[in-house]
């Protein structure tokens, strides 16, 4: 009579090295769980039984057996295909699987990693790193007095100088940000405690009870969160910063109701619907398929002209805040850029220009495009690290009532 625990063990897989294949199968199931595919112990037992039934005569049999056991929803098929081809991609896979040897797990190269979703690369790298043991002589003891933590160093590191691991950590930090826009006063009123007298409510109360005298009712102005409109430059000079800003805009879209996102290089593209997707990988994949002018030239004036002509009346309403993300390096006519920037500033309640070139202490607006934009913005901020993004989030959450007027502030910035 067998024990109850023994009945739940993995079946003995065909061949003399079944234990190694079973361990590798559990590792593959763990990778799928890390990237969001729900694979439980029951599915793992079914997969082992399926391999026992179909054998390992071909890679196609292995693929369909695991797919039938691990995939229960259609949206998980794409990530399973990527994980399967990366995990079981040994060049002599057929011969090795015939002898049931443990397949080699190879971390994808940089070109291949671009084709994978980032969650899959993280899961594979984590699995390979966990299997390595650190020798005793490499374990160092040190004191933390007067040292900088990794998190604080990451906050002030330039996006352009970050390694791949630091970029992933920065993206996770952006996803954890709590982003909010301070509500603004509207022209409409509602009943409630306030300084203004509500004559209609007072007269209605008097009509109901004329013998009680007049009781003055008050009203206060309504508040509403303004729309946020982002115009992000995706030209070659803004490549690394625009990618990080797309993660920021995805997090902002997650926390705010009305966010309209546009990207421009040589043409203007509305990516608002793509960023609505909850999964950041799916959202950025949709953006990459929609936009066709990545890392190209810059035509800021023409793109602002198209935005003012086609989109401003739709999205710039009820006190909208505009985030203009560009370095201001324009190759077209600067006179047209000045006209369109002034038109944009009149339509929006607040224009915030985010320029990564401000990371240089001696930066001056010497380019014609920068000189044309600067007189028509309310705020001129840097956007080159996580600390700058946190300052931006704080700026969006603070009121604008006590701020300097638009043109006066811009003129002072030009003089500096």
Image: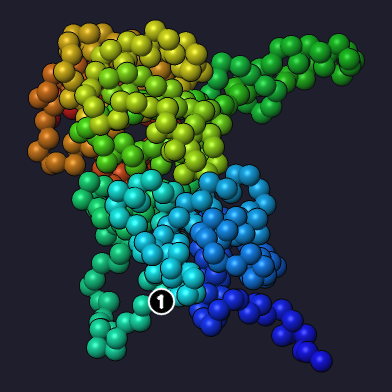
Vertical position of residue 259 compared to residue 311: above or below: below
**What is the residue that sits farthest to the bottom in this orientation?**
1
Measured as percent of width and height from the top left, residue 325 is found at 30, 30
Q: Could you tell me which secondary element the residue under label 1 belongs to?
A: loop
- The answer to whether residue 70 is visible is no
Q: Residues within 10 Å of mark 1 (few under 14, many from 20)?
A: few
Front residue of 217 and 116: 116
How did the renderer colour the structure?
rainbow
Q: Position of residue 126 (x, y in %)?
A: 42, 66
Residue positioned 28% across, 24% down in the render: 265
Q: Residue at x 48, y 43 (%)?
A: 280
User: Where 58 sits versus 376, above or below?
Assistant: below
- Using the rendered view, name the quadrant where residue 271 is placed: top left
Residue at image location 49% in from the left, 74% down from the top? 100
- From what the image shows, is residue 111 above or below residue 290? below
Q: Quadrant of the C terminus?
A: top left
Find disc 1 in the rendering and name its residue: 131
Residue 104 locus on image (x, y percent) = 39, 69
Q: Quadrant of residue 220?
A: top right
The quarter of the picture where the N terminus appears is bottom right
């Amino acid at each position: 009579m067998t024990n109850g625990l023994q009945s739940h063990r993995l079946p003995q897989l065909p061949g003399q090295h079944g234990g190694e294949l079973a361990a590798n199968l559990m590792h593959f199931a763990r990778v799928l769980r890390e990237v969001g595919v729900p694979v439980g112990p029951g599915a793992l037992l079914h997969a082992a039984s399926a391999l026992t039934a179909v054998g390992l005569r071909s890679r196609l049999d292995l693929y369909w057996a695991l797919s039938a056991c691990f995939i229960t929803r259609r949206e998980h098929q794409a990530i399973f295909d990527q994980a399967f081809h990366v995990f079981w991609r040994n060049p002599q896979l057929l011969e090795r699987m015939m002898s049931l040897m443990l397949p080699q797990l190879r971390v994808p190269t940089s070109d291949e990693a671009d084709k994978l979703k980032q969650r899959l690369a993280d899961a594979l790298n984590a699995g390979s790193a966990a299997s390595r043991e650190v020798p005793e002589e490499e374990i160092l003891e040190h004191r933390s007095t007067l040292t900088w933590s990794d998190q604080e160093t990451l906050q002030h590191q330039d996006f352009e100088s970050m390694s791949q691991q630091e970029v992933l950590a920065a993206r996770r930090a952006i996803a954890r940000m709590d982003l909010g826009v301070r509500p603004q006063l509207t022209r409409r009123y509602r009943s409630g405690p306030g300084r203004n007298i509500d004559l209609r409510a007072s007269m209605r109360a008097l009509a109901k009870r004329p013998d009680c005298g007049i009781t003055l009712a008050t009203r206060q102005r309504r508040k509403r969160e303004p729309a946020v409109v982002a115009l992000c430059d995706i030209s070659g000079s803004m490549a690394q910063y625009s990618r990080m800003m797309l993660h920021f805009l995805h997090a902002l879209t997650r926390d705010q109701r009305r966010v309209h996102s546009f990207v421009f290089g040589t043409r203007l593209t509305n990516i608002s619907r793509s960023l609505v997707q909850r999964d950041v990988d799916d959202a950025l994949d949709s953006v990459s398929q929609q936009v066709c002018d990545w890392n190209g030239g810059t035509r800021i004036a023409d793109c602002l002209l198209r935005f003012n002509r086609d989109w401003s009346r739709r999205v710039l309403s009820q006190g909208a805040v505009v985030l203009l993300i560009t370095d201001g390096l324009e190759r077209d006519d600067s006179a047209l850029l000045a006209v369109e920037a002034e038109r944009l500033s009149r339509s929006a309640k607040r224009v915030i220009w985010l320029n990564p070139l401000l990371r240089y202490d001696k930066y001056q607006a010497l380019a014609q495009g920068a000189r044309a934009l600067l007189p028509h913005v309310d705020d001129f901020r840097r956007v080159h690290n996580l600390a700058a993004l946190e300052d931006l989030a704080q700026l969006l959450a603070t009121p604008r009532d006590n701020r300097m007027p638009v043109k006066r502030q811009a003129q002072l910035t030009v003089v500096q």
